Image (spheres, rainbow, N blue to C red):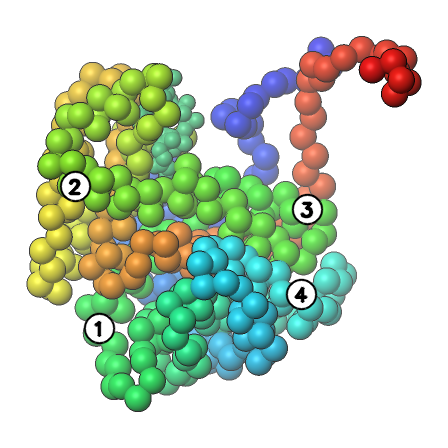
């Protein structure tokens, strides 16, 4: 074991070479396939970014249309999947429902289990999961609220279709508000990839055993669920709500976060890689102002969030440790303004991260990477004789 380098949490271990996402944590730079996140968030669309991440280049207009049409063709899910959904109690967390339904795809498309299938067959799995995730996500919510599910409306773009499946009610008109659809599209772009984070590393390591795309993505969804990763976006809103109910005493909550005997952390703060600022948080903070303004929403927790950020950025504890607001700090405030309930926030993150997971899985397979299998340093007992039950 003397030869093994120990690196808990892989803080300084490169697990792969990748041509997908460039991240410079010191300078706060994030690029997908060489394009800056700032430019993509302003000029691109989520579907175009998905194409870029997965296939490596921006699509021509014809390629984009084909890609969109292929996705629309597969948005419907097998009716038997609805039976699986109906088996969940209404208090099931939508992340658990989502990962289960994604795993269930292996049963409906068993050919996806074959690690040696053709590139075209792999591509069909990719299109299917991109197409069906919004349907699953909206259905997980419908199950929670006890409403009948809506079927996809393929006349609509990706985000509008999702919003309609989420919010339309039987026998009632539903018009997608373009402000809402555009805000969602931008948020999904910002979440689309982030190199070797916890869920993406999970997708790659599960896929490295030649498990199917669906099984690998499902594992990624479960990794994302935790409060230190994607689950932070819900945790931020719960925290801000608690601060509001507590009379807005941000100083008190900052003190809690600094207290080493208290497990509480300032949710939406700090990042393993970004040590100056998170470029996504900058864009999202501005978007939160814009979206709330356009929708005429006045959310008191936005002011609490801004106050908390101001104070933390001046506080020695946070400055010393280079803790800045991350992508999750303001995203929840936008989701809330769009009418999305708190426990769906991490599902929204999963929808956004999906193209990144797919691109990383595909790259890992195409590069014929070896099975992921870290080593350990053993700290247990030395060899000892078995003790008979009568002598224990
Ligand atoms: N509040 C209070 N103290 C913190 C925080 C925080 N949010 N984050 C880090 N610290 C302290 C930590 O206690 C440690 O202090 P000390 O050196 O005195 O022991 C120091 O800062 C370094 O933290 P760490 O835990 O060693 O850093 P890490 O790279 O292992 O963890 C993190 C990164 C994101 C898990 C952590 O900052 C955290 O728990 N943040 C809150 C949860 C959160 O917002 N997660 C979302 C991350 S970004 C998007 C995503 O992945 O989904």
The residue where tag 4 is placed is 106
> Residue visible at 20% across and 59% down?
337
The residue where tag 3 is placed is 208
- In primary-sequence order, the first of circles 2 and 1 is 1
> Residue visible at 17% across and 25% down?
252
Is the shortest distance between ligand 1 and the CB of mark 3 under 8 Å? no
Does 319 appear above or below 45?
above
| Label 3 to label 4: alpha-carbon separation | 17 Å
The residue where tag 2 is placed is 245
- In primary-sequence order, the first of circles 2 and 3 is 3
| Label 1 to label 3: alpha-carbon separation | 40 Å
> Residue visible at 62% across and 61% down?
103
| Label 2 to label 1: alpha-carbon separation | 33 Å
> Residue visible at 57% across and 55% down?
218
- Determine whether, in the image, residue 100 is placed left or right of residue 119: left
The residue where tag 1 is placed is 178
Nearer the viewer's eye, disc 4 or disc 1? Answer: 4
């Amino acid at each position: 074991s003397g030869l093994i380098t120990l690196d808990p949490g892989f803080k300084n271990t490169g697990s792969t070479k990748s041509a997908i996402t460039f991240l410079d944590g010191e300078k706060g730079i994030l690029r997908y396939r060489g394009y800056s996140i700032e430019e993509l968030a302003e000029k691109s669309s989520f579907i175009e970014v998905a194409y870029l991440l997965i296939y490596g280049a921006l699509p021509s207009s014809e390629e984009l249309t084909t890609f969109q049409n292929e996705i629309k063709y597969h948005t419907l899910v097998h009716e038997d999947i609805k039976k699986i959904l109906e088996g969940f109690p209404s208090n099931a967390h939508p992340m658990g429902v989502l990962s289960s339904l994604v795993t269930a795809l292996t049963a409906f498309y068993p050919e996806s289990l074959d690690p040696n299938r053709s590139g075209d067959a792999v591509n069909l799995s990719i299109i299917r999961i991109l197409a069906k995730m919004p349907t699953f996500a909206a259905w997980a919510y419908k199950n929670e609220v006890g409403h009948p599910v809506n079927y996809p409306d393929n006349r609509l773009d990706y985000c509008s279709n999702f919003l309609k499946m989420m919010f339309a009610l039987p026998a009632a008109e539903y018009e997608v508000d373009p402000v809402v659809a555009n805000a969602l599209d931008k948020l999904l772009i910002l979440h689309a990839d982030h190199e070797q984070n916890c869920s993406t590393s999970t997708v790659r390591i599960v896929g490295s055993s030649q498990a199917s795309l669906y099984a690998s993505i499902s594992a990624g969804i479960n990794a994302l669920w935790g409060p230190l990763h994607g689950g932070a976006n819900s945790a931020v809103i719960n925290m801000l709500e608690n601060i509001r109910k507590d009379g807005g005493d941000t100083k008190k909550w900052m003190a809690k976060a600094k207290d080493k005997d208290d497990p509480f952390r300032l949710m939406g703060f700090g990042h393993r890689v970004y040590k100056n600022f998170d470029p996504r948080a900058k864009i999202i903070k501005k978007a939160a102002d814009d979206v709330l303004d356009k929708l005429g929403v006045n959310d008191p927790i936005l002011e609490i969030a801004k106050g908390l950020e101001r104070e933390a950025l001046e506080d020695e504890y946070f400055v010393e440790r280079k803790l800045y607001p991350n992508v999750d700090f303001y995203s929840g405030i936008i989701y809330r303004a769009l009418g999305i309930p708190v426990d769906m926030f991490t599902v929204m993150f999963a929808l956004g991260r999906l193209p990144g997971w797919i691109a990383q899985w595909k790259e890992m397979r195409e590069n014929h990477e070896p099975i992921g299998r870290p080593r350990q340093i053993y700290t247990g007992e030395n060899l000892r004789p078995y003790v008979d039950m009568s002598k224990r």
